[in-house]
Image: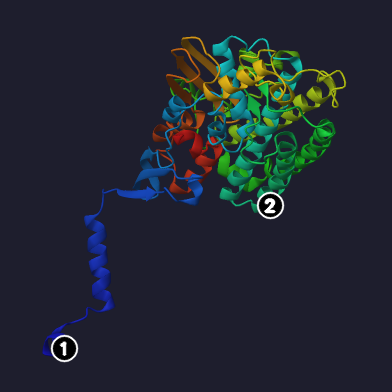
Amino acid sequence: MSQIQDIQIPDSATRAAHAVDDLADMEGERMVLNMGPSHPATHGVLRIVLELDGEVITKADPDVGYLHRGDEKIAENMTYTQFIPYTDRLDYLSPLANNVAYALAVEKALGIHDKLPPRCQYIRVMCCELARISSHLLGLGAFAMDVGAVTVFLLVFTEREKIYNLAEAASGARFTTSYTRIGGLSRDIPPTWCDQVRQFVKECSKAIAEVEVLLTRNRIWVDRLRDLGFVSKEMAIDYALSGPNLRGSGIDWDLRKNQPYLCYKDLDFDIPVGSAGDCYDRYLVRMEEMRQSLRILSQCVEKIPGGAENRTHEPVNVADGKVVLPAKSKVLSSMEELIHQFMLVTEGMNVPPGDTYFGHENPKGELGFYIHSKGGGVPHRMKIRAPSFINLSILSELMPGHMISDVPVILGSLDFVMGESDR
């Protein structure tokens, strides 16, 4: 008891004096802040180690890999067709586009990428543009919510639900679609699908216009985004940025125009390009990209070979029994077709030896697949060029000099997905 009674508690004036002395001792020191990997503003399991001088960032080290699943190694242990579902899990906001990108890479290795039936090409393009709109809508909704505009999030999710309905009608799945096959599609679109797309184009155009009214000239939104997160043309090229982040810096590069594939060369659309390279420019580029995607969808539903009901029976798969599974009716009635199916399912299609790369204009940027084949139905090596991973590499140069409150804005403007980054 006597020891406890001897303890003297300093008064408030003494404590204040000690606090001032402690602050004086810390003058010139910087604080290290661990942001993530479970912070809501990092949009997934991204960790950023920030060094702060007061509220100003002096250093930023992005730390990725918390969602790593080893997709590239997994690809070495299964056939090319078996790997298709894994592509859904890359940018899981645009699985339809991931499927197409991977299928085109394998088809290029097989030498059949220019032999795809026209109807298949148009359906694939519609899937890619629906995926682009879906990805941009969610990216915009999360971006706006990070800055404080919750209403936008509710608006865009209403439109994304319609895209999920279209994905379900075409593929049977809403989220992880696995719709594309090597050499074509798992099935043709249902007869009413094109009419649903037409209706979606009308409704989504109105929703985008409503979002623009809420944000584009909103004083708070503009002040938070403009002159923030500036990326020059030189910096964008040095860090190999792609997609809207590259075009937001004023570089007119889009693989759909510069290296056309599928039926994009037959469609009329524009590529929006920014000028300032700040967060506001990247927002404007994505807004216009959604309008251009709606424009592409409108053209596709009018030009698709065979029309909505495919009365001329246009094929959606290449006529190659060594690549595409035979019809089930033939498998049950023909020994040769049964053997073809058995070989394709167990061993996979025979991809010639060599190296192949195909880059696809995905919503987040250039999604590329590099395939090294030694022959047979399984890739010897595969490398995935994940645009989210590459776009995040600029954070260490982009963030220093900004306030800590600017971090969610910069991250939202880059629009990344950690499933694709870590793969």
Compared with 72, 279 (above or below) is: below
Q: Which mark is residue 151?
A: 2
Q: Residue at the far right: name it.
A: 311
Q: Where is residue 311 drawn, in percent x and y? A: 88, 21
Which residue is at a point 69% across and 29% down the rendered structure image?
Answer: 127
Q: Would you say residue 267 is visible in this rendering?
A: no
Which residue is at a point 36% across and 44% down the rendered structure image?
Answer: 49
Q: Where is residue 210 drawn, in percent x and y? A: 76, 43
Which residue is at a point 61% across and 34% down the rendered structure image?
Answer: 95
Q: Are marks 1 and 2 in contact (CB under 8 Å)?
A: no
Compared with 321, 77 (above or below) is: below
The answer for how far apart the CA atoms under marks 1 and 2 are is 59 Å
Q: Which mark is residue 41?
A: none
Q: Which mark is residue 5?
A: 1
In which quadrant of the rendered image does the N terminus lie? bottom left
**For the residue labelled by badge 2, is the local secondary structure a helix, a strand or a loop?**
helix
Name the foreground residue: 177 vs 32: 177
Which residue is at a point 62% across and 32% down the rendered structure image?
Answer: 178
The amino acid marked with disc number 2 is Thr
Q: Where is residue 287 drawn, in percent x and y? A: 68, 34
Please state if 72 lies on the left or on the right of 292 as rendered.
Answer: left
Compared with 296, 62 (above or below) is: below
Q: Would you say residue 160 is visible in this rendering?
A: yes
Q: Earlier in the sequence, mark 1 or mark 2?
A: 1
Q: Where is residue 254 drawn, in percent x and y? A: 61, 19
Compared with 236, 39 (above or below) is: below
- The quadrant where residue 74 appears: top left
The amino acid marked with disc number 1 is Gln
Name the foreground residue: 209 vs 258: 258
Please state if 155 lies on the left or on the right of 78 as rendered.
Answer: right
